[in-house]
Image: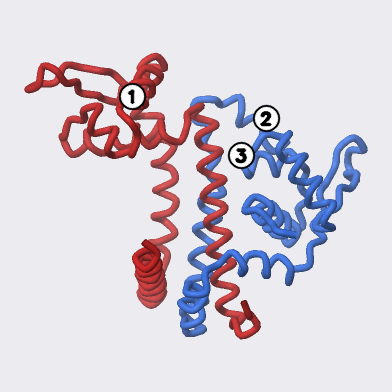
Amino acid sequence: MNRRDTSPDAVRVIEAMSDYQAAEQAMRRRTRESMRMGEADLRALRFLLRRESEGRPVTPADLASALGIKSSSVTVMLDRLTASGHVRRGPHPTDRRSLVITATPGADEEVRLTLGEMHARMLAVAASLDERQATAVTTFLRSLTDTLHELDRSET
Amino acid sequence: MRMSENDISALRYLLRAKERGISVGPKEIADYLGLQSSSITVLLDRLERAGHVRREPSPFDRRALIIEPTVPVGELQKAILSDTRAELLEVAGALEPEAADAVVRFMDRLRAAVDGIDAPVTTPTDRSTRGE
């Protein structure tokens, strides 16, 4: 494909985005390593914490559908996270055949410290934008998202 | 040479460090990318063969290496652009110069924020051995 007509501004934007994307991926790897946890485990904990903050209990089936994994894999994951002290299985209040999964306070703090620091830093960057910049960034990200959705639709 | 995402990340990291006058060794790259040092050796072998980096002895410590980026900027840009969908390039190309500036600055600061997250909260010993 001929890229000669790509404007220098567009190149700078794409470079900055690709840098950010790569940095985020590297950060996620570092975080997982420091928490000694796989990506799915971390996603599961985040899901548990989010639902807990909304006061909505989580069953193993909820976890399976939220993470898009088989219930047998959820069982293995919960065995692991229970053994490491990150989650607890408890009785379901209304369904005797089901379980409620909760994150332990230790896991809560671990995730909060790690992700909380990240969110605070990112929020600080977003807050440093003035109105014009915020509009420019938001408009750009929206049209990027729209374009990606369109591409997705046309490919499926 | 077809560059992987990690190749591109490593090169961009090296170029940013060089811009700030900082020399970087294999360990810093491994820490930054969150990869094992054995994977970094393979990555650097590949980049060195392609002429994109040079391993040089550190001026401060003869046993240590520093990695010098030698990749032409144009080549790195080409690699990044060839990974980018034409439709997304169009969206980026439609930005007014002022908006493009705002987006680049925002992404850059967001990247710096994310780069600062090292996060071994539960393993403080890891942190003390970092960046030595």
Chain designation of label 2 = B
Horizontal relation, residue A14 to residue B1: left or right: left
Q: Disc 2 marks which residue?
A: B129
Horizontal relation, residue A48 to residue B1: left or right: left
Q: Amino acid at mark 2?
A: Thr
- Colour of the chain lettered B: blue
Q: Which mark is residue B34?
A: 3
Discs 3 and 1 lie in a common subunit: no
Check the image and report above or below for A1 versus B43. Answer: below
Q: Amino acid at mark 3?
A: Gly
Q: Earlier in the sequence, mark 2 or mark 3?
A: 3
Residue located farthest toward the front when viewing the structure as drawn? A156
Q: Which lettered chain is shown in red? A: A
x then y, percent, for residue A3: 63, 79
User: Dividing the image into 4 quarters, which one contains the N terminus of chain B?
Assistant: bottom right
Check the image and report above or below for A55 versus A102. Answer: below
